[in-house]
Each structure stands twice: as structure tokens, then as C-alpha cells.
Image (cartoon, grey):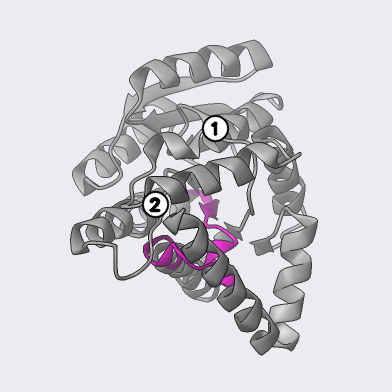
Amino acid sequence: MHNRMMVTGAGSGLGREIALRWAREGWQLALSDVNEAGLAETLKAVRDAGGDGFTQRCDVRDYSQLTALAQACESKLGGIDVVVNNAGVASGGFFEELSLEDWDWQIAINLMGVVKGCKAFLPLLQKSKGRIINIASMAALMQAPGMSNYNVAKAGVVALSESLLVELKQQEIGVHVVCPSFFQTNLMDSYRGPTPNMKAQIAKLLEASPITAADIADYIHRQVAEGVFMILPHDEGRMAWKIKQQNPQAIYDEMALLAEKKRNKSKT
């Protein structure tokens, strides 16, 4: 390990906080995002925290931009040790309301962006025997109503991570997947969906959370150090996942009631 990390979606939110958490230990950071102003702010904060690195604009939908980022990591940092596939967007709406374009947009960024990130950086990780940290969501495990395209994309990130965990073990590449619940973030800036009312409902849940992106980044740091594969930062998330594993029907019944409430709210 040479303490070199790449983070997508590093211009704000959880991506920025992950970069800062590792920067405090003097890591070199390759910071990418479509938000160049946000990237500049993150790099300044990284340097203030004791790290260093560089920024590069990167849209994770474009594989050539990710391979160019990997090449930049090789030329500027001599390689990479940890890849954090964090870039993501929010969406919502009941299945009958979501267009196929809504599905394509969500899958292209939240799932295929992670697939392409892993693919582009795998050769460097094979050299460094590094780690992949994929950011999914509790939505991948609990499938809340009114966000099916988001649920499916994030569930795909979990399945991909499980696949890589077993396939890359012999190559000594570590894999982790993070499934946070609601926390204070600017995720809603990217929200796309047919129902404005639902956006307001989700935004309220995010704002009401006592947990910040910095708290999540701290928890990820500890769990990665311990070698934990599935990282569930929220107490209620860990509890809900345990219940679902033991009694999935109880969760389905709860989600059906939630769907009814959401439908009633969206009509008002």
C-alpha cells in the first residue's frame, strides 16, 4: 500500500467526506466528479486536512473518461491502492410513473458507473493488491416503495460487489460494499422523478437524519480497516437487514403499508 485513493463523486457529500477522512492520514487523492467547482473545494479541504492529490472531471457514464482517469492515477501517483465508486444520483416515483428514460439514466450512473469504475481500475488494483469500495444503499437490501429504478441499480451494485469479492480473493484484492440509510447529504440536487411530492418526502427524511456524511465516512474507515465486506453504517439499517434475513415477509408487509401511505400522500 502506497496510500493512494481514487474517489468518484468527490465534489460534495459522502465522496468529499471519504476523501477528507483518508486525507487526515496523509493519503494522495485522485478526485473526480462532473462538478469541477466542487472538486476544487474538495482538493483545498484535502490539502488543509493533511493529504494531497489532483482533480479530474469524469462522467462515470463514459468509460473512456474513467480509463483516462486511471491513466492519470498511474502517471501522477504511480498507481492506485483504493478505488471508491461513489458517484450516484437520486430518483423516485412509482413503477407505473417512471419512464424507460428514467430507468436508463438511473442504471447508467448508479450501476454501470460502478461497473465501469471497477473495470477501468482493475489492472492498477491487480498490481497494488488494493481495495474496491462500492457505495450502494440500504435501498439495495430493503427495496422501499416508490423508487424501483434506484432500488434495482443499488441492488446491482451489491450483487456486483459480491461477485468481485469471490472472484478477486485469489488476486488479493479486497472488496467492500456500503449500504447507508438516510443521512444529511446533497443527494437531492441530482433528483429526477415524475412526482415532485415524493422528492419533498425523501428530502425531509434526509434532513431529519442525525447522521452526517462525515459520520458515515468515519464508519466506513473503521469497517474497511477491520476487513468487513458489507458495511451498514446505520443502527436501524443493521436491525432491518437482520429482520429481513430472518423473516422477509414481515418487511414486505411493512413496505406494502408504506407504499399505501406514499400513494395517499402523493395525491394530496
| Percent position of residue 97, x then y | 29, 63
Which corner quadrant of the image does residue 266 belong to? bottom left
Q: Nearer the viewer, mark 2 or mark 1?
A: 2
| Percent position of residue 181, x then y | 64, 54
Q: Amino acid at mark 1?
A: Gly
Which quadrant of the figure contains the N terminus? top right
At mark 1, the secondary structure is helix
Which corner quadrant of the image does residue 214 belong to? top right
Give above or below for 76 relative to 69.
above
Please tell me whether residue 220 belongs to the stretch shown in magenta. Answer: no
At horizontal 43% and vertical 33% (from top left) the residue drawn is 78
At horizontal 51% and vertical 33% (from top left) the residue drawn is 186
* Disc 2: CA contacts within 10 A as few (<14), some (14-19) or many (>=20): many
At horizontal 77% and vertical 47% (from top left) the residue drawn is 222
In the picture, the disc for residue 191 is none
Extreme residue toward the front, this view: 268
Give above or below for 36 relative to 222.
above
Residue interval drawn in magenta: 128-151
In the picture, the disc for residue 13 is 1
| Percent position of residue 180, x then y | 63, 53
In the picture, the disc for residue 91 is 2
Taking the image as shown, residue 202 lies to the left or right of residue 66, namely right
| Percent position of residue 72, x then y | 32, 31
At mark 2, the secondary structure is loop
Question: Foreground residue, 35 or 199?
Answer: 199
Residue 238: tell me if it is visible.
Answer: yes
Give above or below for 144 relative to 198.
below
Name which of mark 2 and mark 1 comes first in the sequence.
1
Question: Foreground residue, 186 or 83?
Answer: 186
Residue 170: tell me if it is visible.
Answer: no
Please tell me whether residue 133 belongs to the stretch shown in magenta. Answer: yes
Give above or below for 100 relative to 225.
below
